[in-house]
Amino acid sequence: GITSELILCFLRHLSEEEAFATLEAALPFRDRFVGVGLDSSEKGHPPEKFARVFARAGALGLRRVAHA
């Protein structure tokens, strides 16, 4: 009776370009994850830095979440 789903995480301390590269590299495995999130240090790395990659993920039908 236990289920789980995977979230692909972007590391906040890396660039937006690296987040886009991570998303694109993961797309062939789209059936294995349900969403994307932010991970790593929040200080100095606001979520706005990833607005465009989160928009792309949303357009692909992925759930979006930010956590630390």
Image: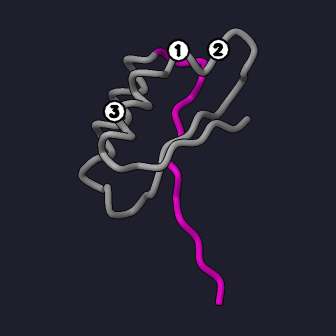
Q: Residue 49 at what x, y percent from top left?
A: 52, 14
Is the residue 36 above or below the residue 56 in the image?
below
Q: Which colouring convention does the figure follow?
A: one colour
Residue drawn at (60%, 21%) of the image: 47
Lower sequence index among marks 3 and 1: 1
Query: Pointer 3: what residue?
Result: 56
Name the quadrant of the C terminus.
Answer: top right
Q: Nearer the viewer, residue 38 or 59?
A: 59
Q: Residue 62 at what x, y percent from top left?
A: 40, 49
Q: Residue furthest left?
A: 28
Q: Are marks 1 and 2 in contact (CB under 8 Å)?
A: yes
Q: What amino acid type should be assigned to the residue bearing mark 2?
A: His
Task: Give how far apart the Cα atoms at labels 3 and 2 are.
Answer: 19 Å
Q: Residue furthest bottom?
A: 1
Is the residue 26 above or below the residue 51 in the image?
below
Q: Which residues are magenta?
A: 1-15
**Which is closer to the viewer, label 3 or label 2?**
3
Query: Pointer 1: what residue?
Result: 49
Q: Is residue 12 left or right of residue 31?
A: right
Q: Which mark is residue 31?
A: none
Lower sequence index among marks 3 and 2: 2
Residue 66 lies in quadrant = top right
Query: Pointer 2: what residue?
Result: 45
Residue drawn at (69%, 38%) of the image: 67
Q: Disc count in the image?
A: 3
Residue drawn at (33%, 28%) of the image: 21
Q: Is residue 64 left or right of residue 45?
A: left
Task: Give how far apart the Cα atoms at labels 1 and 2 are.
Answer: 7 Å
Main SS of the magenta segment? loop
